[in-house]
Image (cartoon, rainbow, N blue to C red):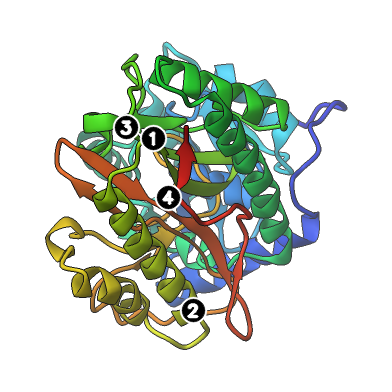
Amino acid sequence: MTTQPQSKIPLPFSKAEYDNRLAALRKRMGERGIDVLLVFIPANVLYLTGYVTIGFTNFQALIVPRTGRPFLFIREMERLVAQATTWVEDFDIFADDDDPMERLRAVLAAHDWLGKGLGAEMNGGFVSPLMMREIEQRLGGLKDGSGLVEAGRRIKSTEELALIRSACRVTEAGITAAFDAIRAGTTENMVAAAAYTAMMAAGADFFVNDPIVTSGWRSGIPHTTFANRTLERGDTVLLEFGGCHRRYFGPLMRTAVIGPVKPAIEKMSGVVVEALNAAIAAIRPGVTSGSVDEACRRPIEAAGYEPYFRKRTGYSVGSAFAPTWGEGHIISLRKDDPSLLEPGMVFHMPPALRMPHQYCVGFSETVAVTETGCEVLTRYPRELRVVQ
């Protein structure tokens, strides 16, 4: 075991907040009959400990017993960053020439935890099915601990909401800079560069997969982003950024059009804004995810755009590492979903309509469920930006 150094990066949350998260997790572990939980998912390890590294794809495990101190099982290369960024004081290390699975087995055996209520997250993106199968074989069977940490992440604390608000300010700086850079003859890359520079200057931490800038016919294809296309008159330009502060995100989507503006684009823009407004108005504690989705969907279907809106209305956001800022696996706003909204939930709601291979119009907000309704955390004009 090693101890913390004197020099540390300030934690994003109070120690009391981490203590509350850990106590709530241990209660859920007991309800599932798990005495020791292996936490593999980087965002979950972050949530419980503050651990931040750009090496988050390396094999790692936060080992949480129901009693006693948690400790981190990490690669030797990560030891110093773990010591500098977490409140955790105990670490077990494996070298690059070690077998990490065998080393993990030995560590757990030394604590006499093998075969005694051992559970693990089985839904982690950086622990492959083959690795999980090997872990189960080495450890002699595991209980499924998937979702135990995420159950706490559903509701954001006051401290978490403060970080998300800060992230929203970063995003807004990027949207402003991108709009200022849009003109016929420039490129998607130049617009993305302006946005990136502005967000970095506003204090952003490292992102996940943005800035997202897609224009003209390419904007009519979902999940495209900057690719050196030159902007032309009549193009729509879709922007979607997720500013980051201490690994918390505040996404925002907006659309510009380089004049002249086609009437069809103006009409579609009005419908998307109406749908977003309706979804925001529907949010309050006790309503279902499906009812918010229905509120968003109704204006779109009434305008005849239903074939172009075959997706969810929104998804949870909070803390994240690449490849996505979303927490849709925790809760999403989608058709017929019976999940009930609770105060402290935060969603990114990005309704968008595309004419395939022609153009796209999209607007979004990051919102928080409050005790009485909804707070829109992003602050930006909800309108089509026309560039002459």
Distance of mark 3 from mark 4, alpha carbons? 28 Å
Q: Which residue corresponds to mark 1?
A: 259
Q: Earlier in the sequence, mark 4 or mark 1?
A: 1
Q: Earlier in the sequence, mark 2 or mark 1?
A: 1
Q: Amino acid at mark 2?
A: Ala
On residue 326, which mark appears? Answer: 4
Q: Which residue corresponds to mark 3?
A: 235
Q: Earlier in the sequence, mark 1 or mark 3?
A: 3
Label 4 close to label 2 by CB (< 8 Å): no
Q: Position of residue 168 (x, y in %)?
A: 63, 48
Residue 181 image-quadrant placement: top right
Q: Amino acid at mark 3?
A: Asp
Distance of mark 1 from mark 3, alpha carbons? 8 Å
Residue 66 image-quadrant placement: bottom right
Residue at coordinates 34% horizontally, 14% vertically from top-left? 228
Few, some or many residues within 10 Å of mark 3 (<14, 14–19, 20+): many
Q: Nearer the viewer, residue 386 or 33?
A: 386
Task: Please tell me whether mark 2 or mark 1 is closer to you in this view.
Answer: 1
Label 4 close to label 1 by CB (< 8 Å): no
Where disc 1 sits, the SS reads loop
Residue at coordinates 49% horizontally, 54% vertically from top-left? 383
Q: Earlier in the sequence, mark 3 or mark 2?
A: 3
Residue 294 appearing in the image: yes
Distance of mark 2 from mark 1, alpha carbons? 32 Å
In the picture, the quarter occupied by the N terminus is top right
Distance of mark 3 from mark 2, alpha carbons? 31 Å
